[in-house]
Image (tube, rainbow, N blue to C red):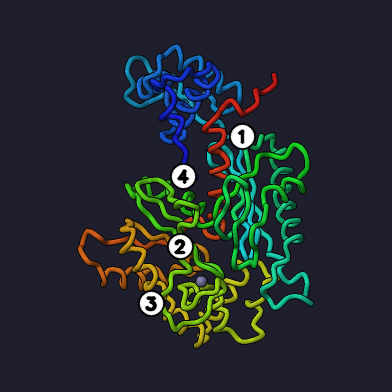
């Protein structure tokens, strides 16, 4: 499933021959207005009419519908150079509608809830319980049922917070570390969890019980890319590659402002680009994959056998802080690992630059956490291998840290109501 046509392309001004029901047309026009406010910020009804091509009477009627559903609210008097007398600004309302994102990472489960205005309303992160069954565990064993239970608990915490804050939840997006069957809400495989063909949507829905919000799935790196894209778009960057560094390495690719999923959703599985036919065996069954050179395990391997940072029982941020402390204390193998890591990153990033010609590469996951050690050398090495000066790519760190995928999930969940505002219930009283 490639990204769907946005309602703004099918709504007002559409000249389709098939009859369009009144409700569908109204929903499309409501979406057109809501998306316009989402993209451009608050403005008066007169400006909205001028910019969208809808009549002033339509805008007035549509805005009152959006107000009734708690999606927009009246703001201050518009100050921009509008035609005629200044009107009251209409803007997205933060207090009624929210979206939830849940990242199922190999090291942690992070949940994030955002309101329609983009404010974070709830976040939480817990370590992944992969050592629950010591008898079966070699440190790599990810038992399915306890993880699904914990994921449902994290979702329930966010839903409870939503109820306490009077927020209606449009949807929740779950981000597993692997390719997805979008139609069936299944994880096709997640090699680093040892999972294959898991009906994640159905399993979580059953655990949450009746009345749970719609659950959809999207890949973690793709969601992170979507979460970072608006920050870069403000500077005219429409083509980017988000690299997430965990036990595995994944990429979210945005080209000309649109997320690239690939024909069957496998785009961005860059951790398995083969870089060394004689290299180490990868969990995917191939040899010399990029993630055998830059995955988080390569950092852990530089630690002493009993180092607490190796423990998956600790929260990820604590583990990263322990590694940081060792680096600063002069732990030689670790320092050497980070020096080589920049070069190993460039081996794969260079391929991506040559294939995709992005304007920006964003380092996320643990790469982003150690951005002070990685961004400058990766930037310098990529600059050195430029084919032409206008092929330069800007390297930066994720601004959202380990919560990027969950934040992107919340934003994608809110898309559901931006696409069809009639889903939001009319407020009482
Ligand atoms: Zn591999």
In the image, residue 251 sits, relative to residue 50, either above or below, namely below
For marks 4 and 3, give the CA distance.
34 Å
Question: Where is residue 10 drawn, in percent x and y?
Answer: 43, 27
Mark 2 and mark 3: span between their CA atoms?
Answer: 15 Å
Residue 137 falls left or right of residue 96: right
* Closer to the eye: label 4 or 3: 4
Q: CA distance from mark 4 to mark 1?
A: 26 Å
In this figure, which residue is indicated by the disc labeled 3?
Answer: 343
Q: Would residue 351 be found to the left or right of residue 160 on screen?
A: left
Residue at 76% x, 60% y is 145
Location of mark 2 (residue)? 243
* Label 4 crowd bin: few (<14), some (14–19), many (20+), radius 10 Å: few
Circle nearer the N terminus (2, 3): 2
Mark 2, mark 1: which one is toward the viewer? 2
SS for dot 2: strand
Q: Residue at x 40, y 14 (%)?
A: 55
Local secondary structure at mark 3: helix
Q: Position of residue 325 (x, y in %)?
A: 56, 77
Mark 4 lies on a secondary structure that is loop
Q: Which residue is mark 1?
A: 97
Residue 387 picture quarter? bottom left
Task: Give the mark, 4 or 1, whose residue is nearer the N terminus.
Answer: 4
State how far apart marks 2 and 4 are (Cα).
Answer: 21 Å
- Residue 47 location in percent, x, y? 38, 22
Q: For mark 3, does the 10 Å Cα neighbourhood hold few (<14), some (14 to 19), or many (20 or more) residues?
A: some
Decide: marks 3, 1 in contact (CB < 8 A)? no
Q: Nearer the viewer, mark 3 or mark 1?
A: 3
Disc 4 residue lies near ligand 1 with CB under 8 A: no
Mark 2 or mark 1, earlier in chain: 1
> Can you name the residue that lies furthest to the left here?
388
User: Which numbered tag is attached to residue 2?
Assistant: 4
């Amino acid at each position: 499933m490639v990204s769907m046509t946005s309602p703004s392309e099918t709504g007002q001004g559409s000249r389709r021959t098939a009859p369009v029901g009144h409700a569908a047309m109204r929903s499309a026009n409501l979406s057109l207005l809501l998306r316009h406010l989402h993209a451009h910020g608050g403005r008066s009804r007169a400006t909205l009419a001028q910019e969208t091509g809808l009549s002033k009477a339509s805008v007035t009627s549509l805005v009152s519908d959006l107000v009734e559903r708690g999606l927009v609210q009246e703001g201050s008097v518009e100050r921009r150079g509008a035609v005629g007398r200044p009107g009251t600004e209409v803007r997205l309302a933060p207090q009624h509608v929210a979206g939830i994102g849940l990242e199922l990472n190999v090291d942690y489960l992070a949940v994030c809830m955002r309101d329609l205005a983009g404010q974070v309303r709830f976040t939480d992160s817990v370590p992944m319980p992969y050592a629950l069954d010591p008898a079966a565990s070699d440190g790599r064993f990810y038992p399915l049922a306890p993880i699904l239970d914990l994921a449902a608990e994290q979702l329930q915490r966010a839903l409870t917070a939503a109820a306490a804050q009077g927020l209606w939840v449009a949807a929740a997006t779950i981000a597993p570390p692997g390719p997805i069957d979008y139609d069936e809400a299944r994880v096709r495989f997640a090699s680093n969890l040892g999972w294959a063909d898991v009906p994640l949507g159905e399993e979580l829905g059953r655990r949450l019980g009746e009345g749970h919000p719609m659950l959809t799935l999207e890949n973690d790196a793709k969601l992170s890319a979507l979460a970072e894209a608006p920050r870069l778009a403000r500077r005219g960057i429409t083509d980017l590659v988000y690299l997430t560094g965990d036990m595995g390495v994944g990429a979210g690719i945005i080209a000309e402002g649109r997320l690239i999923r690939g024909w069957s959703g496998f785009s961005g599985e860059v951790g398995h680009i083969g870089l060394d036919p004689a290299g180490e065996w990868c969990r995917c069954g191939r040899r010399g994959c990029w993630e055998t050179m830059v995955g988080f395990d390569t950092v852990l391997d530089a630690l002493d056998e009993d180092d607490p940072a190796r423990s998956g029982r600790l929260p990820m941020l604590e583990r990263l802080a322990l590694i940081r402390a060792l680096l600063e204390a002069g732990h030689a193998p670790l320092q050497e690992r980070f020096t080589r890591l920049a070069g190993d990153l460039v081996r794969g990033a260079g391929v991506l630059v040559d294939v995709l010609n992005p304007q920006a590469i964003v380092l996320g996951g643990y790469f982003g956490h150690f951005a002070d050690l990685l961004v400058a050398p990766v930037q310098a090495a990529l600059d050195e291998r430029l084919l032409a000066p206008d092929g330069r790519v800007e390297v930066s760190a994720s601004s959202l840290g380990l919560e990027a995928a969950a934040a992107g999930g919340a934003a994608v969940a809110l898309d559901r109501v931006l696409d069809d505002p009639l889903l939001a219930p009319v407020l009482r009283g």
